[in-house]
Amino acid sequence: MVLKVLFKFARLQHEFSGGEEIRCPCRKCGNRRFHAIEEVKLHLFRHGFIAGYETWTSHGELLQGSTFLNSQTPNEHTTENVHGAHSGSQDETPWGQRMLEDIFGGHVPINSTNYDPNCGEQRGDESPNEDDISYLADHFQNVLQAADQPLYEGCNEGSQLQFVSEVMSIKSDFNVPQDEVNRWLELFGRYLPRDNTVPRNYYETKKLVAELSLPVVKIDACPNGCMLFWKNDKKLEVCTFCGEKRYTYDAYQDCRSKRQKRTAISVLRYLPLTTRLQRLYASRQTAESMIWHSTHESIGNLMGHPSDNEAWKHIDNLYPVLNLCVKIYL
């Protein structure tokens, strides 16, 4: 019954469907192929759903609390909160500034010496530098400028940042190749007024959006998973356990340094937890949900959530230092 409702909804979203066909969310097709509904049902029966595909974003369903990409223009000031209710025009802050305040408010600055703005990744064994306030301010100002900058003089439909955000969203939803994105951007830039701020290619688009991303720490690893080349071992070139080489050497040779170009065979990408938690507390949509366990009201003697259990309350009383309204339950 639930699938019937979802299929009916997906077929009505003409921007996300191909006539009578819809994207197939099975593990084999991965939302990349269009099929008739009966064939989609058969695929789901045989292969199952894509892991974690609970909100049908590739079929037109909006994420709860989604304010990043909205059909409303920035001037309408209409956003959707976590429960799906519209906040109306109470907040007169422009669309771009509201989004950036949610992203950067309380966000840990990124170490400018290790951070690559093109890919949102760090190299090395250090965590993001929490004292580098000036670097965070520069990031905020760069993106704020893009959020306030119109696509061309007299454009009221949206800013450069909003245009870039929607381009990246379409590329992700429809799995658009990079070369095709470059052609579209070239076309837009050619037909819009001469002073337009449309990025020239996908690289520039990604570079602008990367300012909004969270840091990723890249750590070289043994190809067999024995160890990480990190901290005291970061200068080693051979695994101390299995003897496997750390790098593969390309045929290309740098004429100036007389050294071959080397590439790590295996790389671990670590997502620092602190910055992600601070991003959750910075967002007006998620901050309230983060402390829900401590603020929600129990219904009589019924256990509606594990936090209503006596064992949960016993732990809170046993460790009062941890019993804070801002604690995180993982």
Image (cartoon, helix red, strand yellow):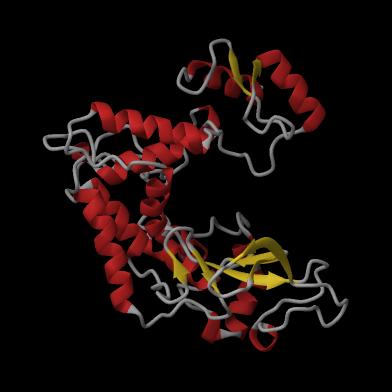
Q: Measured from the top left, where is residue 228 in percent x and y? A: 72, 76
Q: Which residue lies furthest to the top in this view?
A: 20
**Residue at (53% x, 31% y) in the render:** 174
Q: Is residue 177 left or right of residue 211?
A: right
Q: Can the viewer see residue 59 in this picture?
A: yes
Q: Residue furthest bottom?
A: 232
Q: In this view, does 258 lie to the left or right of 38?
A: left
Q: Measured from the top left, where is residue 39 in percent x and y? A: 72, 16
Of residue 277 and residue 255, the one placed in the foreground of this image is 255
Q: Measured from the top left, where is residue 248 in percent x and y? A: 73, 65
Answer with the quarter of the image where residue 281 lies: bottom left
149 relative to 233, above or below:
above
Q: Measured from the top left, where is residue 42 in percent x and y? A: 77, 20
Q: Is residue 42 left or right of residue 114?
A: right
171 relative to 237, above or below:
above
262 relative to 2, above or below:
below
How many labels sit on residues?
A: 0
Answer with the quarter of the image where residue 195 lies: top left
Answer with the quarter of the image where residue 68 lies: top left
Q: Can the viewer see residue 86 in this picture?
A: no
